[in-house]
Image (cartoon, rainbow, N blue to C red):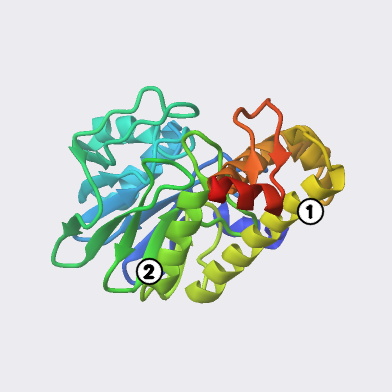
């Protein structure tokens, strides 16, 4: 959890300068899932790119418009979850700026009214005299997730790939643990000095933060395997959650079940468990059985 004194930095309507090129405005949607709220980032001054307009709140959108001072050129979306993209339509209506996002559409939780003018994908760039943003397609949290790397500051506008003070929810089918871990490993190998998450404070040093994420995810995977061994029979996700997430309040267990499901799907890919549906039965495949399957 982010301390109360830090939350003061994220008051709705506050325009905070984070670096020579980056400003932050936080949407008024603080919650256990969004931390202090969704961060809208403004990149540049003479020409401005807005990343994640957030929720469609009139006061929040007006604050963005005023901060851009007539110089908004690009509305960029990291992904189309309802706390990130709905404000893009109102922002466009007020400024005429085009909307950019990845072409893939989410199947479950999504901004149902989202539409964009231009698609972005891996390696595409937003460029002007002040800055260059390079797009990275980073599925894992969401199939259509993009990060934007600010070349001049070696800063990654990371969307929901990382979250200050909490772990990112991975919710299949739009999210996948294997994809997420692959992308975190990839980001760790890049020359990134700092991470600007969609929820919370700037995070650095990036390599340390990203390694901590990998370590945490591996620990959770090990806990799921230990729970399956402890139960020692075909079981369900709620039963696994009860063991693995003893340190998490009960009201968050349903959301934790999404993460366990994502872990189980990864373990299934690894031929370590068998199962299919989130509400179905999951079984640990013992090493002797895995060896037998390979011989077959």
Q: Position of residue 13 (x, y in %)?
A: 48, 47
Residue 17, numbered label:
none
- Residue at image position (24%, 54%) is 48
How many residues crowd around disc 2 within 10 Å: few (fewer than 14), some, or many (20 or more)? many
Give the mark nearer the N terminus: 1 vs 2. 2
Q: Based on the displayed image, in which of its 4 quarters is residue 148 positioned?
A: bottom left
Q: Position of residue 141 (x, y in %)?
A: 49, 45
Residue 175 or residue 290, whichever sits in front: 290
Q: Based on the displayed image, in which of its 4 quarters is residue 165 positioned?
A: bottom right
Q: Is residue 134 left or right of residue 254?
A: left
Q: Position of residue 183 (x, y in %)?
A: 43, 58
- Residue at image position (53%, 67%) is 210
Q: Does the image show residue 98?
A: no
Specify the farthest residue to the front. 296
Q: Is residue 107 above or below residue 44?
A: above
Q: Which residue is mark 2?
A: 155
Q: Position of residue 243 (x, y in %)?
A: 83, 46
Residue 58 or residue 53, whichever sits in front: 53
Q: Which residue is mark 1?
A: 226
How many residues crowd around disc 1 within 10 Å: few (fewer than 14), some, or many (20 or more)? some
Q: Based on the displayed image, in which of its 4 quarters is residue 284 positioned?
A: top right
Gap in Å between the C-alphas at discs 1 and 2? 38 Å
Residue 199 or residue 7, whichever sits in front: 199
Q: How many marks?
A: 2
């Amino acid at each position: 959890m982010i301390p109360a004194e830090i939350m003061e930095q994220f008051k709705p309507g506050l325009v905070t300068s984070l670096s020579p090129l980056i400003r932050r405005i936080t949407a008024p949607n603080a919650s256990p899932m969004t931390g202090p709220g969704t961060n809208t980032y403004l990149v540049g001054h003479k020409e401005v790119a807005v990343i994640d307009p957030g929720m469609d709140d009139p006061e929040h959108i007006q604050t963005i418009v005023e901060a851009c001072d007539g110089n908004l050129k690009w509305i960029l979306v990291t992904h189309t979850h309802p706390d990130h993209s709905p404000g893009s339509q109102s922002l466009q209506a007020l400024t005429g700026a085009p909307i950019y996002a990845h072409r893939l559409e989410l199947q479950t939780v999504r901004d149902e009214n989202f539409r964009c003018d231009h698609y972005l994908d891996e390696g595409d760039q937003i460029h002007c005299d002040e800055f260059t943003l390079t797009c990275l397609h980073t599925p894992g949290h969401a199939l259509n997730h993009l990060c934007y790397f600010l070349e001049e500051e070696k800063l990654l506008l990371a969307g929901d790939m990382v979250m200050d003070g909490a772990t990112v929810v991975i919710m299949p089918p739009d999210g996948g643990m294997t994809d997420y871990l692959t992308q975190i490993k990839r980001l760790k190998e890049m020359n990134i000095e700092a991470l600007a998450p969609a929820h919370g404070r700037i995070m650095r040093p990036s390599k340390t933060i990203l390694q901590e994420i990998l370590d945490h995810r591996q620990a959770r995977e090990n806990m799921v395997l230990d729970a399956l061994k402890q139960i020692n029979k075909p079981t369900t996700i709620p039963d696994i959650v009860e063991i693995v997430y003893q340190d998490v309040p009960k009201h968050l267990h349903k959301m934790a079940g999404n993460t366990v499901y994502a872990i189980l799907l990864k373990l299934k890919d690894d031929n370590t468990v068998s199962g299919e549906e989130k509400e179905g039965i999951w079984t640990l495949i013992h090493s002797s059985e895995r060896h037998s399957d390979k011989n077959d």
